[in-house]
Image (cartoon, grey):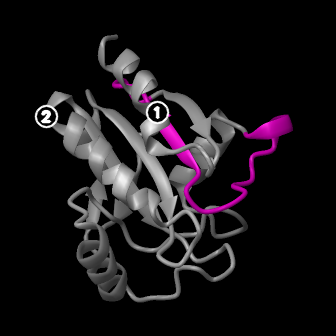
Amino acid sequence: MSALDFSADNLQGQAVDLKQYLGKVVLVVNTASHCGFTPQYKELEQVYQQFRDKGVAVLGFPCNQFGHQEPGSADEIGSFCEKNYGLTFPLFAKIDVNGSNTHPLYQYLKAKAPGILGSEAIKWNFTKFLIKKDGTVYRRYAPQTTPTELVADIEALLSE
């Protein structure tokens, strides 16, 4: 089993098989439109633009579990991200990353890359996971870690 053995609905409600990202370095992040970390969308898009032709995918998973900072509908989320940040990387339908309704992808990611002191819970918006080309989870990053700070790890994984 790997992180890419799951599917998730895109913002339009269509199922997306994550196996299509096998062979790419994948950055998965839970996002929110009304968060102090929301400006990270800009850096996520920059990282995506810099590396997409080299085999990197950025996948955004909106989540409303932290301070209700992603209250909008799928259309509102998509419009906000396009208008304010010009996002071109894939965004998925809003999911839960903690609790009894945690999306299966996040159950897997949290088990394979626990946080501080072994906690599996996602602490806040913009927690990031980097996945190797073979679908194994490389590492979890705190919300405060900016996408630009991941560039060295992305480049290392691309060269594997």
Picture quarter with the C terminus: top left
Q: Give residue 53's mark.
A: 2
The x and y percentages for residue 63 are 54, 71
Question: Magenta segment: does it hold 127?
Answer: yes
Q: Which residue is disc 1 drawn over?
A: 150
The x and y percentages for residue 83 are 24, 78
- Res. 69 image quadrant: bottom right
> Number of numbered discs present?
2
- Amino acid residing under circle 2: Asp
Q: What residue is shown at x 37% (from left), y 50% (from top)? A: 43
Residue 152 position (above or below residue 46): above
Residue 51 position (above or below residue 119): above
Predominant SS along the magenta part? loop
The secondary element bearing badge 1 is classed as helix
Please indicate, yes or no, whether residue 9 appears anywhere in the rendered image. yes
For the residue pair 50 and 66, the one nearer the viewer reads as 50
- Res. 23 image quadrant: top left
Mark 1–mark 2 Cα distance, whole angstroms, equals 17 Å
What is the span of residues highlighted in magenta in the rendered image?
Answer: 115-135
Image side of residue 76 versus residue 12, left or right = right
